[in-house]
Amino acid sequence: MLCVFVGLLHVVGAAQPQPAKPAVALTLDDAIRLAQANEPSFAATVAESRATALERKDAKAGLLPSVVYHNQYLFTQSNHTFAATVEGGRPTSLPVFIANNAVHEYYSQASVNETLGLAGAAAVRLADANAARAQAEAEIARRGLVATVVGLYYNIRSGAEKAAAAQEGLDESNRFVDITQKREAAGESAHADVIKAQLEQQQRQRELADAILAREKANLELGVLLYPDPGTQFAIADEAIPPALPGRQDVEAAARSNNPEVRSALAALQASEAETQAAWAGLLPDLALNYTYGIDAPQWAANGLDGARNLGYSASATVDIPIWDWLTSARKVKEAHIRAAATRVALTAAQRRLLADLTEFYNEADTARRQLASLDTSIADARESLRLTNLRYVNGEGTVLEVVDAQSTLVSAENARADGLVRYHVALAQLETLTGRL
């Protein structure tokens, strides 16, 4: 019986709902770190950057000598005649094919090869430029992802503030409906005041539902970037005050020294110049060097049957001088010059875009920062206006339209404050990603 009772306790305990885990409070740095670990496009860009870094090493390795250890056994049909030479004290049969040296032939050779020419140096230069451009593109992708995360992160905070403002507005509408009903019952106001208050109450209910929906949508959008399950519960960490705006000169200096768009355009120009160098290589000769050491003999041995030494070496130097290729190489040089001119235009455009974005983002952040204090003042004034308007209405000195208008003004001011905070954070994030600080 005791065992049965203990088992029932376990069943009852298992059936009880477990307490929900508290939502994780995410800072902006946490959100950026999670997004970088889970966003597929950014992962592909980083992988490409790492792959081009390996290709750079391969191009440099192409300038170094290569070593091959070659082993081969070659059997050729005999022509059933015997050579005049004697191997091991007996005549040897000759092969059918004149290109082969013996019926049984063994190769065991180490071969060192090296090619000297402009093409190898151009390949290294091109690989360096491609690696630099891929690295810059990875940084561009990272900064774009950061800007996206910042926008979603502060949209969640804005959605929460708007939902709180909508709930406050609904509570105020509920109180005002109660006031109008009591005044109607006391014969101090018309039924039209009650209807107007109820209409305002219904509008506030719809606004609250929309605000909650927008907040949940923002949570899901950020959850897609951060977690395998977009429905994972998380919260936004509290922020005491918005971060300060850095000085204009510091921002300009950082943007000019650390801008991936300009670095990418510069790397593209370097790549086009390397392609031009490679095109010129088609018009110049290459020097190929070879050194081979080993055996090429009828026996797999260092010495033959007659004691002759089979081990030996050979060396060669080859120079191929291009004479005529129907002007193909010359046209490739012209093509490379044309593309290089286009990349120079792209570089100057990236530099102009940097200057324009720098001014635009800084002015946007500065304007949004200066407006935050004004928005705070507007909320305080709207609260005081609503309080005084309610008192005037209760004392019979104000109208229902004045109260409804004061309520709408307060909700609008609170929503504007939430939007203004998002605007400042997004502009500041754009500025900091432009300078590489974020």
Image: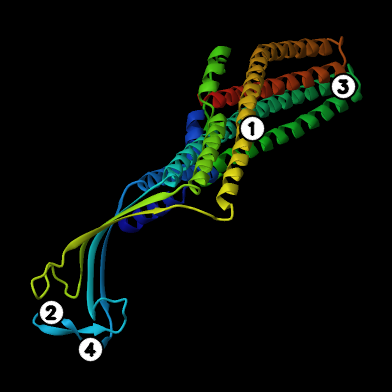
Looking at marks 2 and 3 on the same chain, the residue that comes earlier in the sequence is marked by: 2
Q: Earlier in the sequence, mark 4 or mark 2?
A: 4
State the image quarter where residue 52 is shown: top left
What type is the residue that disc 3 sits on? Answer: Glu
The alpha-carbon separation of the residues under discs 2 and 3 comes to: 132 Å
Mark 2 neighbour density, 10 Å: few (under 14) some (14–19) many (20 or more): some
**In what element is the residue under mark 3?**
helix
At a point 87% along the width and 26% down the height, the residue shown is: 196
- Residue 87 bears which disc, if any? 2
Q: Look at mark 3 in the image and give the residue it sits on.
A: 184
Residue 212 visible somewhere in the drawing: yes
In the rendered structure, find residue 378 and report the number of the disc placed on it: none
Marks 2 and 1, the one that precedes in the sequence: 2
Question: What is the x, y in percent for residue 235?
Answer: 53, 32
Give the spatial CA distance, label 4 vs label 3: 133 Å
Indicate the secondary structure of the residue bearing disc 1. helix
Point out the tag, 3 or 1, that comes first from the N-terminus. Answer: 3
Comparing marks 3 and 1, which lies closer to the viewer?
Answer: 1
Residue 4 in the image: above or below residue 241:
below
- Furthest toward the bottom, the residue is 80
Q: What number is the disc on residue 81?
A: 4
Question: x, y (%) of residue 30?
Answer: 47, 32
Q: Is residue 240 above or below residue 34?
A: above
What is the C-alpha distance between the residues marked 1 and 4? 75 Å
**Disc 4, disc 2: CB below 8 Å?**
no
Nearest the eye: 233 or 147: 147
Label 1 sits on residue? 345
